[in-house]
Image: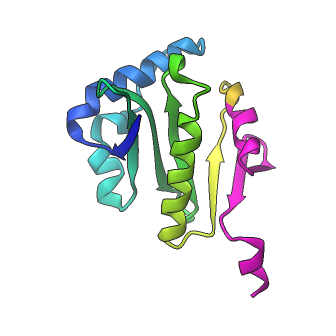
Amino acid sequence: MRIISFEEKYRDDLIYMVLSAKNALGRVPRLNEDFLHISKSYFELGHPFWIALDEFDRVIGCIGTRCDEEGKLFLSHLYVKFDCKRHGIGSQLLQLAEESAKERGYQEVHVHLGKDYLESHYFYPKHGYVEYQEWYMKKSLVSEESKSL
């Protein structure tokens, strides 16, 4: 498995993977419009979007980051192909997104859970996220040592 910055040639495979992941969770597969224009929705706004690829060069996971109107950095679209879950792919994507956020000067990262994504309610707390509002979690990217300096 390797993780790369999104490239347009993977767009259709990314969309297929996300719709399949939603279907496997029992959700009605609905396409988020930003998947049609990753460059415009992420890169042109200064935000990254990554994909995980398997040994056959197929998309098996993704994650991006974006800011809201208040400038808070949010994780966006962390998906892992259903039959690839529980292999650390989501954790690796999350770690990459957090490292990128730190490098860009963000001190915390937020995530909107959504009530239909029950797995996310278990996944994020394992990685240090805490709930601060119903359906929202955040994680400080500043170490305790840095806070005391």
Where is residue 148, by image quadrant? Answer: bottom right
Highlighted magenta segment, given as a residue range: 120-149
Q: Position of residue 45 (x, y in %)?
A: 35, 59
Q: Position of residue 99 (x, y in %)?
A: 53, 60
Identify the residue shown where x is 40% and y is 57%: 47
**Which quadrant is home to the N terminus?**
top left
Compared with residue 101, is residue 58 higher up or lower down, i.e. above or below?
A: above
Identify the residue shown where x is 63% and y is 47%: 111
Where is residue 124, by image quadrant? Answer: top right
Residue furthest left as drawn: 9
Which colour style is shown?
rainbow
Q: Nearer the viewer, residue 68 or 140?
A: 140
Q: How many marks?
A: 0
Q: Is residue 6 magenta?
A: no
Q: Is residue 53 left or right of residue 125?
A: left
Q: Position of residue 79 (x, y in %)?
A: 51, 31
Q: Is residue 145 left or right of residue 18?
A: right
Identify the residue shown where x is 78% and y is 50%: 130
Q: Is residue 136 magenta?
A: yes
Q: Is residue 7 left or right of residue 24?
A: left
Compared with residue 122, is residue 81 higher up or lower down, i.e. above or below?
A: above
Q: Nearer the viewer, residue 41 or 10?
A: 10
